[in-house]
Image (cartoon, grey):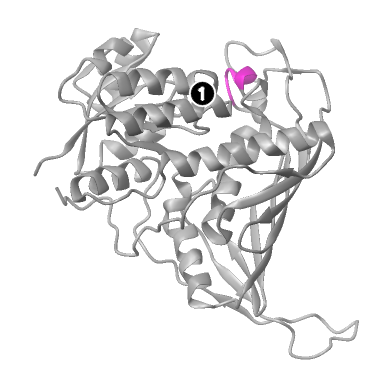
Amino acid sequence: MGAPVGVGIIGAGNISDQYLRNLTAFPDVRVLAIGDLLEDRAREQAAKYGVPRAGGVDLVLGDPDIEIVVNLTIPAVHVEVSEAILAAGKHVWTEKPIGVDRASSLRMLEKADAAGLRVGVAPDTVLGPGVQTAKRAIARGDIGRPLFAQTTFQWQGPEIFHPNPAFLYAVGGGPLLDMGPYYVSALVHVFGPVAAVAAVGLRATDSRVVQVGPLAGQEFPVEIPSTVSVLTQFEQGGQASSLYSTDSPLLRQGIVEITGTEGTLVIPDPNTFGGPITITRPLAEMIVPPAPVVQEIVEVEQEGVLAGRGLGLLDMVRSIRAGRPHVATGRFGYHVLDTLLSIEESVESGAFVPVQSTIDAVGSIPADFDPYAATL
């Protein structure tokens, strides 16, 4: 109490830079150790960011000064690593998704509950000023009653930038499981829990080729649908249509539009922490071509301090110290996973699939939340 919280990291791969850049700048946490199966990679990251200790996974799990461990491993082993963290008596912050199947993910959450430990789940982008400001605007009634949403994520795929993209096309990956958590999380923050989904999907090719890095030219299999179109029904009313694709030469990402009875709100890319927020009002009168269509567009001022990955962990740290719930809970992450797996099942069955899990009202990040303030 009264001091920064000790944090460890397991997984020193591609995304660890984003976490380390921010966590080493937040006064309320102190990154004490990095562990990886490739110990030299862990040591390189530790040296780069001034982290005092690095080596294997056991180094992190056995450190008595570490209270929370960040799980940055590949999705297929998220649950295994999270359970090891819990067994070591430490809280878990895990990259998304929480797991790749319901049974093991739920078992891990039950173990956390039994041990009195917390689980937090990415993405925490939706906790940034962008989505949170938009969420407050909706709560104020700025667009009236929310009716429906449209989201789009389409491009040609991560093999053009990622040095080892095969896991993104394996079970637990793909545009749905890799990018879906951002969009589903944003929608659940606005509309509440998902009731049912329907989807169709396709796989454009059975294999892909690495485009960059030391593995360039290497072919790898595509195990999942690379394009998925989704219809979503929410428990509290409202619906959404979403596209997830890595088969499109046309780049259209980060599109989240929420239409209410009094306007359409454009939310920033849920894979980022902030951005422009606008509300388009209904036409005041009929526009007859060739006269240009001019509509009232209102800019919503973004509230809050812009940071980056690690924001959800920081909220968890402060919440633990204050004895209150954190926002990006394990149960929230499980509901998102349950929704995504239900979408996969709908692709296979061709029918609407009910989402079995539900969650209570989703918390919010206050507008005055400052990641760079020392509060502990």
**Nearest the eye: 169 or 274:** 169
Using the image as rendered, state which of residue 231 and residue 315 is in the foreground.
Answer: 231
Indicate the amino acid at tag 1.
Ser
Residue 52 in the image: above or below residue 242: above
The residue at the point 50 percent across, 28 percent down is: 105
- Magenta includes 57? no
The residue positioned farthest toward the left in the image shown: 2
- Residue name at image x 40 percent, y 58 percent: 364
Query: Which element type, helix, strand or loop, lies under badge 1?
Result: helix
Single out the residue that lies furthest toward the right. 289
Q: Residue at x 29, y 64 (%)?
A: 368
Left or right: 63, with 134 as reference point: left
Image coords of residue 201 (percent x, y): 81, 35
The spot of residue 347 in percent (x, y) is 79, 35
The quarter holding residue 211 reads top right
In the image, which residues are magenta? Answer: 162-167
Where does residue 227 sit, x and y in percent of width and height?
77, 36
Residue 188 falls left or right of residue 19: right
The residue singled out by tag 1 in the image is 104
164 in relation to 292, above or below: above
Residue 11 visible here: no
Q: Is residue 341 visible?
A: yes
Would residue 120 appear left or right of 232 to someone viewing this image? left
Which residue is at 58% across, 60% downward? 191
- Compared to residue 267, the image places residue 160 above or below, namely above
Q: Is residue 76 left or right of residue 318?
A: right
Q: Could you tell me which quadrant the N terminus lies in?
A: top left
Location of residue 246 in the rendering, given as x and y in whole percent from the top left corner: 73, 34
